[in-house]
Amino acid sequence: MKFGKNICILNVGGTKYAFTREIIKDFPLRRVSRLHNCASEKEVLEVCDDYDHERNEFFFDRHSEAFVFIMLYVRSGRLRFAPKMCELSFYNEMIYWGLESTHLEFCCQRRLDDRMSDTHTYFFEEDVKADEESGDQCMTVTGPTVNSEWNIRWIAKLRRIFEEPTSSIAGQILAALSVIFVILSMVILCASTLPDWETAKNRNTEEHRTIEAVCIGWFTAECGMRFLLSRNKYDFVRQPLNLLDILAISPYYILLVTTALLGESLEIQRAGTMLCMLRMTRVFWLVKLARHFHGLQTLGLTLRRCRSELVMLLVFMCVAMAIFSALAQLLEHGLDLEPRNHDYDSIPAASWWVIISMTTVGYGDMYPITVPGRMLGGVCVVCGIVLLSLPISFIYHSFLQCYHQQRFRSSRPSKSLSAEVLN
């Protein structure tokens, strides 16, 4: 804020809150943080309802009790409905201050969706976040121009098509095409490892190159459009799925450019070997299917929430593997007894037998031949079953919770309430 005192007072429905200008600058509520960039009283009145210059007090004619619960969210990070208040009215307050339904707790999201389904309101698409970040910053007293509003709506629709395939028929068609190209690319990648592939490739070089170019072109166009439509380009590049897209696409263009500039030389062939290794990263394109299938989304969400349980499982396995591999090496090879099992000549070699025994895989390539070793093997198998079952129960319950949550989100209305409808 480029004027006024150091202390700012927010008067929301008669309840006053005092903050410093530094806190206002990074305030989690977008409407409040916009006050910091206001250079005149005219700009301030576009954000709030009234302003007292002498006391540096900003007036908001909003529901004071709802703002109390919104402030609790600012402090604790947990947003719930105000008691004895209509869910749609509280959601209206959330939109005004710059929050979305995703900020609500899971139970409150379900209440809001049930309330939406019970009403007979006609919803229309509106990207509130994009409007707050881009449209409101350039808004004047007379409001945004028709062209800017039209552009914002079209960008919001395109973003929903690419990011939310179930939001429209166009999004479903785009998702179906993406799945088809992923499957086609995987079929070509698997067929390229067949013994007869090189002979067939020499006969149909142009056809193979055309199919590969079409698949790469589709993935490039899809990744480029999602990059252009993303709100934050830096966050887009940091996402794991987008990094896999870039890593899988780049070898094709690198090889294409180097071949065009330097020709088919020995160095290019050596570099081509490295690039062929990078091409194998295309198998990770199957992870892209997580954007279209809730089952894969559930799996990813479960793994992310169960990081501590997975680490605990890994620690259990490592400790048990160290103990049993040392004992197995001692009983099977370390003692000066006959016969000596040379498969257990070292502790790292015995670790392989321990891990396949604890997971009850049992390939049969290694097995104890002494009586103490076989007794140790039985104990190892029983301990493996017990150790695996302890953290897996937590992972199972987390998977069920994530599964029901994904099903709930997928059944939610694809169109969201706008501020105009709620008002």
Image (cartoon, rainbow, N blue to C red):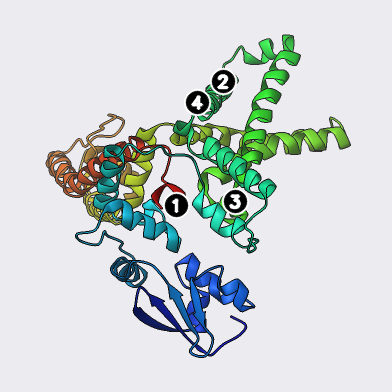
Q: Amino acid at mark 2?
A: Leu
Residue 393, x across and y down, in percent: 18, 45
Can you identify the residue that label 1 sits on?
419
Residue 322, x across and y down, in percent: 27, 54
Residue 47 visible in rendering: yes
Choose top left, top right, bottom left or bottom right for residue 61. bottom left
Question: Mark 1 or 3, which is nearer the eye?
Answer: 1
Dot 1 or dot 3, earlier in sequence: 3
Tell me the residue at 65%/63% (across/down).
140
Dot 2 or dot 4, earlier in sequence: 4
Dot 1 or dot 2, earlier in sequence: 2
Residue 421, x across and y down, in percent: 42, 47
Q: Amino acid at mark 1?
A: Ala
Can you identify the residue that label 4 sits on?
169
Q: Label 3, label 4: how many angstroms apart (C-alpha)?
A: 27 Å
Can you identify the residue that label 3 sits on?
237
Question: Mark 2 or 3, which is nearer the eye?
Answer: 3
Can you identify the residue that label 2 sits on?
184
Name the foreground residue: 244 vs 280.
244
Q: Amino acid at mark 4?
A: Ile
Tell me the residue at 78%/33% (across/down).
256
Tell me the residue at 52%/30% (across/down).
171
Q: Label 2, label 3: how many angstroms apart (C-alpha)?
A: 25 Å
Residue 308, x across and y down, in percent: 29, 57
Residue 306 visible in rendering: no
Q: Label 1, label 2: how many angstroms apart (C-alpha)?
A: 44 Å
